[in-house]
Structures are given as C-alpha cells and as structure tokens.
Image (tube, grey):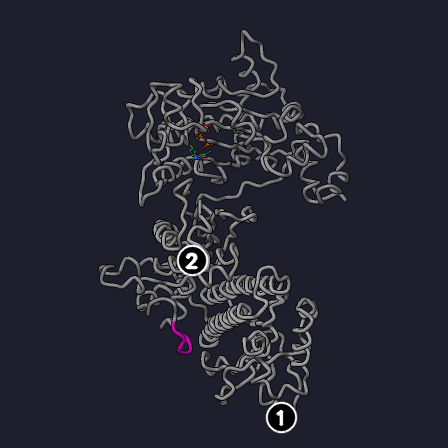
C-alpha cells in the first residue's frame, strides 16, 4: 500500500552541525595549556584511570579510543592529559558542557530554523536564507569564495588531484549547475560563515553536513572531521548510500537493522533498492516499509523542528560492579541527589524560559541475583510532576517502589521477604518531560521564588508547588477548592493576580473556577479509589499466603499469586495513566481559563474512562465513606446512577461501570463492605480463577442474594481465610 511520501526532488537546504570532540574542547577552553596536547576527558570514577568519554583528535592519532580506561590510554599515548569531568553531588556535573552547547546554539540559530538535537548537535533549516542569497547575491557573481568554503568536500565531485581547490571553487561558482545545487552552494557558504563565527565567539570548532534533508546532512557531517564541512549534491546520493553499511544509518543500528541483515540479507543501504515498497511493508508494516523504501533512495521528509531548548531534563547515575545499590535506603539517598539536580534545572527553566514540565519519569537498570528471570527489565514509571524538591523526591521514591514491585513481584516487596541482595540497581535516572510554556499571566510564578525572603525560613514543604497550581495561580486564587487541600502552599496571589488580570478573559469567572475545582476534585477522588483498590489487593495477597495451598509448588497458588500481582500492576498502571490524564485535563482546563478570550471547554469527568482494565475491583462497590468527603461521594453516586438505597429497596443489580461508591455514607455499620456487580464481571477474569473459587464467586454474585453484601462482599477474602481453610 503506497503511503504519501516526500518529494525526492527536495529543494530544502538542511545543515547538521556537530561540535568536534566537544567535552575536550570545553576543557581546553577552560585550560588553554591543554591546547595542542593529546587530551581526553574521563569519568570522575578513577578506577583504572577512569572511563574515557571524549577523546581529542591529537590523542586519536595515537590510537586512543573512547572505549578505553585512562590507564590503557596512557599506555598507548604516555603524554596524554586526562581531565576529569566536573563532579557535583557525587556524580558527573554536565552543566558546563550544556551551557557551552547553548552558546553555540545561540550563534547558529541566527540564520534559520534551528533544532538542538543533543548537547553538541544542531540541525538548521537554511532554505530561506539560501533562496534569498541565490536571488540577491548568487555564488556565480562572487569573485571569490571564503577560505572555509574552499575547504568544503563536495561528494561526487570529480577532483583533479593537482587542483582540488579549483574544482571546489568551480562547483561553488559554476553557473551551469542545477538550481538545487546552487541552493546547496548558498547553504554551504552560509554554514562556512557560521562555523567561523562559532570559532571566533566560542573558540570551538565544529563540522557540518549540508544536504537536502536531515538524514543526508547528518550522515555527511561525520564524514570529514574535525573543522570541515561536507556537501551532498542530489546526484551523489545513490553512490553515497550504495556502500553505506546498513547499521550506520540512524535508527537501523538496532533490531531492525539486524533483521534486515539476517532476514533480507541487506548489508548496505543500497541493497534495499532491490525490494519493492509493498514487499518492505509486508515485512515491516506500512510505515516502516515506506520509510525503508524512502531511505534507500535518500528521501526523508523529517522537518527541522524549531527548538532551542531541551524537550526534557534528566539526571542520572550508573552504579557499575560493586557500586550497585542493593537497599531501598541507598536508592533513596541517590534519588534525593538526582532529584535535587533535576529540581535546580526545573527552576532554572521556569525562571529563564517560563516553562513547566508535566511528567516525572524514573528509569532504572537492575539485575536479580539467583534468578533465572534476571533478564526482566526494570520498568520505567511516570507520574504527573509536582514542583518542589520534597514532592519530587517523594514521587521519585514512589515511582521506584512501583517499578520494584513489578520487577521483583509485589509479595516480596510488601512483606520484605526479599533478601537484602535479591536485587541490585545498576543505573538510576529521573527525568522531567512534557515541557510547556506557562500561560501568559502566570509568569509571576517566578516572582514567587524570588519573593521568598529567605528560603530557609520556609519548610521544604512550603516551597512545593504543584505544577497544576503553577499553571493556575491566576485563576485559583486562594489556592484551594471546595476545602480540599492543595499539594502546594497557600500562595499569596496578590501580586500574581495583578499580573494576571490583563489576560483574564471576560467570561463567567465563577463558572469556570468551578470547572477547575471539579477537575481537581475528580483527580483526588480517583486517587482515593485507586488506593482502595491497591489496599484490597494487598489483603487478597495476605490471605492467599495464609491458605493451606500457599506453596510455590502448587500451580493453583502460583496462578492466583500471579493474578493478584498482575491486577495490582494493572491498577498501579491505570492509576498513573489516569492521573496523567486527569492532571493534564486539569492543567488544560486552567490554561483555557487563563488564555485570553477563551471559553474553557466543559471537562468531561468520567471515571468509566478507564476502559480495558480487568481489575477485579471494578466489580466492587465500596460502602466505606470514611475517606470521602460527602460531596465527592454524592457526585460519584450520581454519575454512576446507582445508590445503595436504590439497591436495597429495589433489589436490582447496580449498573455503574467502574469501582464506585454505592452508599451515601449514612450507615456506618456497613462501612467496610464490598459488593459485586454480576453484570460487569469480565468472564475472562472469572474463568481464570480456580473452579472452587469461581463457584463461590458466582454464588455470591446472585443478584437476589446481594442485599446481604456486608458479609458476602468479602467472600474472596473469606475464602482464603484460615478459618475457612483449616
Ligand atoms: P560525540 O558527538 O559522540 O563525540 P565527540 O564530540 O566527543 O567527538 P566527535 O568529534 O567524533 O563528534 O559526543 C559529544 C559529547 O558527548 C562528547 O564530547 C562526550 C559526551 N559523550 C559521553 O559523555 N558519553 C558517550 O558515550 C558519548 C558517545 C558522548
């Protein structure tokens, strides 16, 4: 099936600019005496001289490689200068490199759309600048070209060995070259100038690729390093790709590249040309198939995204070998450090760029000892990001626990049965993503940080600001809704309000404020419900372990244990997903609210939205009102349209779709009971239970018997209880 593909006669002018041995250059700028000497930057860990992470070009001549350790590098190059990466909080501090990268970006971004692709790489879309140059001052009218442009490598150009410079000059100035080549020539002249400017302003050299798309520009920038540039005229593309090893192509270094090699015997990008688009789609799916067909022809429609600021912030550390973390307290200690760094960057971004991040994610790498399953990956976990160091640290630890529960199994974690050395963490990182600009009118959040007379006079807690709150300072006013406490402090909004008023839409403020409050309110209710579900899972697991058949050799026991673990994971997952969902709705609602002249959309609040969860607890109705404010309770009942009083009077099964409350909270004697909704039980879940339990559950689900839910409702637990089984 053909998919719309970008034109192969692409006339864009794209440059990829890559700093040369970047960390080494940054260190050499700090210590000019290192210039001209073989130099490498090593990790702060000094074992065997530390691992090399950047090797200068002088050192490369001696055969020093990034994979070496300092001691090994010294053997092949005794004069090498090894510089340690700066350290802060016991880990590498990359801020000096990050800031140096920003200096370069601010120069490069002057000529066209600029995308910061990594700490030392940038894409530029120079199409407009090149077209302007071609129209106003075309190369053929130039009497000479700059020395830097002269040194360009033009792929496919038949060079006269004796007179390379003349050949290149002729290509640049040639009046008979085609329009697209002329555009590339203009782009290359611009890039040569930019590179010189970078050198002058920052003392850094960089290399560049100039082509008609990002993919080709990136390939070209690494072809001639350091301090050179390579141009890819369209006529040279086929030859370039013909011999390019498939694994060298971006995104083909992994499994897809391996599959192409082993399944289709494709070794170079050019080898792909023998396959039709349909054949590649059949094998790898429509999009990947078309993408492969395109790259074989040097076609790529990927745009340069205008982005000077990073899309996320992260802080991580590895714990190789014996440094691996084996206790929760050691993980907590490091998470605290990583969160502190992340927090600093978040606050800097907030202050400098008026941006907030919405999602906090924890990644970890781990291994299990004495476990055949040790290849299982430690799952990454995310949650809505709440501002404030205490909250970030707290949330990061919770994410770690959630990941660990899944990684080693809930029972081990919960009962602390896991032996101290059952798991080991070899890498931890915490990142903040989904970064957005804060809406106008809320920029005064930064004033909040400034205006604190002395941070130490506040508790950490008081510095905490929920992201949602940050986005809504101007709308939520007193910082609380319907008596629910906010995660953050009671912010003095007098200053903020003043700033925000200019942007305040002329609409029914009360009505919209209520919407915001309701969204927040739903968010809290959902959290409560999920907590209850998790608690119930714990009880189930507890009781399962007290049964006679609690033994890992009993397949029934193992199956049930896995099922409870699975359900628990699912609840945790749906909890995070729903929180994200509602959290972003909440932000959106508030952003809409503060956006000029925008009427906020009515928030649809449906807990039923968590479709697909097969959590057994979907079928339970809590009678416990103690943890719910009355208004929450009423709303839930109304939305799910069933109430316990209806039920008692009419003896009808309830029809709500998710875990929902079915009692108005008047009858305390029933507060701990659960009931089930037979019409909503997923038969797949029930069928997986052992037959005797299925029978009991089915019996307990008979609608005519459900009036007595207080007792019946806990029948699964009851089934496991020692008294029943012994
Ligand atoms: P690279 O651009 O991969 O390499 P480089 O700039 O050192 O050298 P080249 O001239 O060949 O492009 O990496 C940029 C910086 O990122 C590098 O100077 C150090 C850092 N880095 C690491 O810290 N660890 C790594 O594994 C890699 C690949 C890079």
Judge left or right: residue 454 versus residue 63.
Answer: left
Q: Which residue is mark 2?
A: 438
Question: Badge 2: how crowded within 10 Å, few (<14), some, or many (20+)?
Answer: many
Residue picked out by circle 1: 649
- Residue sitting nearer the eye, 612 or 673: 673
What kind of element bears circle 2? loop
Q: Position of residue 516 (x, y in %)?
A: 47, 71
Q: Using a 10 Å C-alpha cutoff, classify the residue at mark 1 as few (fewer than 14 neighbours), some (14 to 19) or many (20 or more).
A: few
Q: Nearer the viewer, mark 2 or mark 1?
A: 1
Considering only vertical position in the picture, is 374 above or below 607?
above
Q: Position of residue 64 (x, y in %)?
A: 43, 22
Quadrant of the picture in which ligand 1 is shown: top left
Q: Nearer the viewer, residue 39 or 399?
A: 399
User: Residue 163: x, y in percent?
Assistant: 54, 9
In the shown orientation, is residue 698 left or right of residue 185?
Answer: right
Determine whether the beta carbon of the residue marked 1 sits less than 8 angstroms from the nearest atom of ligand 1. Answer: no
Tell me where residue 162 appears, x and y as whole percent. 54, 6
Q: Which residues are magenta?
A: 481-485
């Amino acid at each position: 099936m053909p998919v719309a593909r970008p034109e192969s006669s692409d006339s864009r002018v794209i440059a990829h600019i890559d700093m040369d041995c970047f960390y080494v250059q940054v260190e050499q700028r700090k210590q000019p005496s290192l210039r001209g000497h073989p130099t490498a930057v090593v990790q702060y860990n000094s074992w065997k001289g530390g691992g090399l992470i950047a090797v200068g070009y002088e050192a490369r001549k001696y055969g020093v490689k990034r994979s070496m350790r300092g001691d090994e590098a010294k053997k092949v190059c005794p004069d090498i200068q090894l510089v340690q990466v700066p350290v802060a909080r016991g880990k590498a501090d990359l801020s000096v490199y990050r800031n140096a990268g920003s200096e370069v970006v601010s120069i490069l971004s002057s000529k066209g759309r600029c995308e910061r692709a990594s700490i030392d790489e940038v894409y530029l879309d120079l199409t407009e600048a090149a077209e302007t140059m071609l129209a106003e001052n075309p190369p053929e009218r130039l009497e000479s070209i700059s020395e830097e442009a002269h040194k360009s490598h033009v792929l496919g150009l038949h060079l006269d060995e004796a007179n390379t410079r003349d050949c290149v000059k002729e290509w640049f100035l040639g009046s008979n070259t085609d329009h697209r080549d002329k555009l590339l020539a203009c782009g290359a002249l611009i890039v040569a100038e930019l590179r010189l400017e970078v050198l002058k302003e920052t003392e850094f050299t960089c290399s560049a690729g100039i082509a008609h798309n990002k993919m080709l520009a990136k390939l070209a920038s690494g072809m001639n390093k350091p301090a050179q540039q390579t141009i890819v005229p369209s006529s040279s593309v086929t030859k370039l790709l013909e011999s390019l090893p498939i694994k060298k192509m971006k995104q083909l270094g992994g499994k897809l590249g391996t599959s192409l090699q082993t399944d289709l015997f494709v070794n170079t990008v050019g080898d792909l040309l023998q396959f039709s688009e349909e054949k590649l789609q059949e094998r790898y799916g429509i999009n990947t198939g078309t993408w492969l067909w395109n790259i074989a022809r040097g076609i790529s429609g990927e745009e340069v995204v205008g982005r000077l600021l990073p899309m996320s912030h992260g802080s991580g550390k590895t714990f190789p070998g014996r440094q691996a973390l084996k206790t929760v307290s050691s993980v907590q200690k490091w998470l605290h450090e990583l969160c502190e760094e992340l927090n600093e960057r978040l606050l800097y971004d907030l202050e400098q760029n008026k941006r907030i991040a919405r999602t906090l994610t924890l990644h970890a790498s781990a291994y299990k000892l004495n476990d055949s399953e040790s290849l299982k990956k430690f799952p990454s976990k995310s949650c809505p990001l709440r501002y404030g160091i205490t909250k970030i640290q707290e949330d990061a630890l919770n994410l770690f626990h959630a990941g660990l529960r899944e990684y080693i199994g809930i029972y081990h974690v919960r009962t602390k049965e896991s032996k101290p050395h059952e798991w080991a963490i070899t890498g931890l990182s915490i990142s903040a993503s989904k970064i957005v600009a804060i809406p106008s009118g809320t920029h005064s959040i930064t004033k909040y940080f400034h205006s604190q007379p002395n941070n130490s006079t506040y508790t950490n807690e008081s510095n905490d600001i929920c992201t949602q709150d940050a986005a809504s300072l101007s709308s939520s006013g007193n910082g609380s809704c319907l008596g629910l406490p906010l995660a953050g402090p009671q912010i003095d909004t007098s200053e903020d309000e003043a700033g925000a008023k200019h942007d305040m839409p002329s609409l029914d403020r009360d009505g919209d404020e209520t919407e915001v409050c309701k969204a927040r309110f739903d968010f809290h209710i959902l959290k409560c419900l999920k907590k209850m579900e998790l608690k119930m899972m714990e009880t189930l697991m507890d009781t399962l372990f007290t049964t006679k058949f609690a033994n890992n050799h009993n397949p029934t026991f193992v199956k049930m244990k896995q099922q409870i673990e699975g359900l628990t994971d699912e609840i945790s997952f749906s909890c995070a997903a729903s929180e994200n969902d509602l959290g972003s709705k909440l932000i959106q609602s508030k952003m809409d609210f503060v956006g000029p002249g925008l009427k906020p959309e009515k928030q649809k609040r449906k807990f039923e939205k968590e479709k697909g969860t097969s959590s057994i607890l979907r079928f339970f109705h809590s009678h416990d009102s103690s943890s719910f404010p009355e208004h929450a309770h009423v709303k839930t009942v109304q939305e799910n349209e069933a109430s316990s009083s209806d039920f008692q009077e009419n003896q009808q099964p309830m029809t709500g779709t998710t875990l929902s409350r079915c009692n108005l909270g008047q009858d305390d004697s029933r507060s701990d009971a659960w009931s089930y909704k037979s019409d909503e039980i997923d038969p797949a879940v029930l069928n997986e239970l052992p037959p005797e339990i299925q029978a009991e559950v089915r019996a307990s689900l008979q609608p005519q018997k459900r009036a007595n839910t207080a007792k019946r409702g806990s029948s699964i637990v009851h089934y496991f209880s020692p008294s029943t089984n012994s």
